[in-house]
């Protein structure tokens, strides 16, 4: 395959967004350029990070491997790094003939030269600088196909008003897990202001592609790392913590039909999906699954996944949690005696964090199960003191599947917590684990 027949990739990633865009039903958020991108491409409605914190989630997005496998189980600025021999997307594409460049944010390593980019500038990750450098770079593009990665700091805290014009605090819609106070409303309005500025910056990148004609040969991928910096979102394995926005627009020359992709998608699936779309072989150590066939031919295609798996081990402190999520249920295992919610410093120091913090000090349950149809925001734990036999049966089956995944990725929590084998308490054998059928309602 010659270079002129190989597609480019523009990969834009944001920081702490979750799914807070207009196209995801947040009609109080102003995000016209990303909403337009979704209308032109593929909107992923059930994409989940592998972890609800920056480095582990990004590590999976860029390696196609779970944090336990690639080694990045905690934050890079706390000293965590990829294991030796782990290959990233830019390294794989560079070895396959693409020119790879990064401008702005990366949170995978303290040594960005190790990431495999042919060129990088991580000196500033505010969106204006990233767009300026990416636009300058496009004025003298390399002769070969490219992977251009634009990493925005936004919409991470803080949200200074001299950089981001807040939205109208009276008009924001609060999630049901936040109390309705003036300070909390203003905090969300500030968050929305950061989103609007970053959305406009993405628009500039898209305009540059259109003016140069590169939109005809370039896959545009927009993704974020995990949920927003709000209590019960970032740093948790609830939907608000692991649910991520993801939009993919195929090259214009393909004349593809816009679609909404409602199937489960994990952060580890991005690398194999992109590689297959680009015609590059998927390395055998990739743990994610490719959705390329389903995206190209959505009719009559079986789902790639029936579950996604998520994890947390270290954020500001040791907090080991693992979870499995299907379209119907969310099941979580907590392996350490911790408060009901662990608030990272940036959330604890915010208006929502200060209001919620006194409510988070109760004991955390060892196991949690939520019916996502009846309880989409995961507020009623079905495995509480009054758990029914039906809930216990579902929890036991999901515990088995979660344990199988942990064994497959060699997930060993560095502690003697009895909970590391919670599934042992609910079954005597793993012999028929692959034959499990989750009970219906």
Image (tube, rainbow, N blue to C red):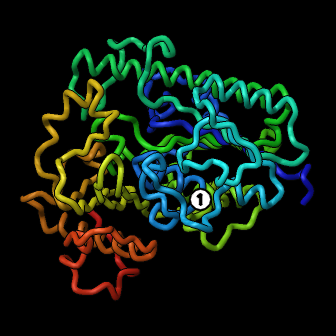
Tell me the residue that label 1 is attached to. 63
Residue at 27% x, 33% y: name it.
Answer: 348
Q: At 49% across and 67% down in the image, what residue appears?
A: 69
Q: Is residue 104 above or below residue 187?
A: below
Q: Is residue 122 left or right of residue 352?
A: right
Q: Residues within 10 Å of mark 1 (few under 14, many from 20)?
A: many
Residue 29: x %, y % from top left: 46, 23
Q: Left or right of 296: which side holds 83?
A: left
Q: Is residue 33 visible?
A: yes
In the picture as drawn, the residue positioned furthest to the left comes out as: 385
* Residue name at image x 31 percent, y 36 percent: 345
Looking at the rendering, in which quadrant would you find the C terminus? Answer: bottom left
SS type, badge 1: helix
In which quarter of the view is residue 320 placed? bottom left
Residue found 72% across the figure and 56% down from its top: 277
Query: Where, by quadrant of the figure, is residue 128 drawn?
Result: top right
């Amino acid at each position: 395959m010659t270079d002129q027949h190989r597609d480019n990739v523009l990969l834009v990633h944001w920081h702490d967004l979750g799914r807070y865009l207009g196209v995801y039903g947040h009609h109080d958020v102003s995000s016209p350029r990303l909403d337009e991108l979704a209308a032109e491409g593929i909107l992923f409605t059930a994409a989940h990070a592998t972890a609800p914190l920056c480095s582990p989630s990004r590590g999976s997005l860029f390696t196609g491997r779970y944090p336990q496998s690639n080694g990045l189980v905690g934050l890079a600025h706390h000293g965590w790094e990829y294991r030796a021999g782990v290959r990233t997307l830019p390294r794989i594409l560079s070895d396959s003939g693409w020119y790879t460049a990064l401008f702005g944010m990366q949170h995978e390593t303290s040594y960005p030269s190790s990431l495999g980019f042919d060129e990088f500038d991580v000196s500033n990750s505010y969106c204006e600088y990233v767009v300026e450098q990416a636009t300058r770079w496009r004025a003298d593009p390399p002769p070969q196909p490219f992977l251009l990665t634009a990493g925005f700091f936004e919409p991470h805290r803080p949200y200074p008003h001299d950089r981001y014009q807040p939205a109208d605090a009276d008009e924001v819609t609060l999630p049901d897990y936040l109390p309705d106070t003036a300070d909390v409303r203003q905090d969300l309005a500030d968050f929305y202001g950061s989103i609007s500025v970053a959305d406009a910056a993405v628009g500039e990148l898209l305009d540059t592609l259109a003016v140069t004609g590169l939109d005809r040969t370039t896959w545009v991928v927009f993704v974020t790392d995990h949920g927003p910096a709000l209590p019960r979102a970032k740093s948790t394995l609830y939907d608000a913590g692991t649910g991520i926005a993801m939009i993919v627009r195929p090259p214009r020359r393909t004349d593809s039909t816009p679609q909404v992709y409602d199937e489960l998608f994990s952060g580890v699936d991005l690398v194999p999906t992109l590689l297959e779309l680009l015609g590059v072989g998927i390395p055998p150590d990739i743990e994610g699954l490719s959705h390329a066939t389903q995206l190209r031919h959505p009719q009559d295609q079986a789902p790639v996944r029936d579950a996604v798996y998520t994890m947390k081990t270290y954020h500001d402190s040791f907090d080991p949690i693992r979870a499995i999520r299907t379209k119907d249920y969310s099941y979580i295992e907590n392996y350490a005696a911790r408060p009901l919610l662990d608030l990272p410093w940036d959330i604890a120091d915010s208006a929502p964090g200060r209001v919620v913090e006194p409510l988070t000090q109760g004991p955390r349950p060892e196991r949690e199960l939520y019916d996502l149809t009846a309880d989409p925001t995961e507020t009623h734990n079905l495995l509480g003191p009054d758990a029914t036999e039906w809930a216990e049966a579902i929890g036991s089956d999901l515990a088995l599947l979660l344990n199988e995944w942990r064994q497959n990725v060699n997930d060993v929590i560095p502690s003697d917590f009895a909970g590391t084998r919670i599934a042992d308490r609910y079954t005597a054998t793993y012999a028929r684990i692959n034959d499990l059928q989750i009970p219906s309602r």
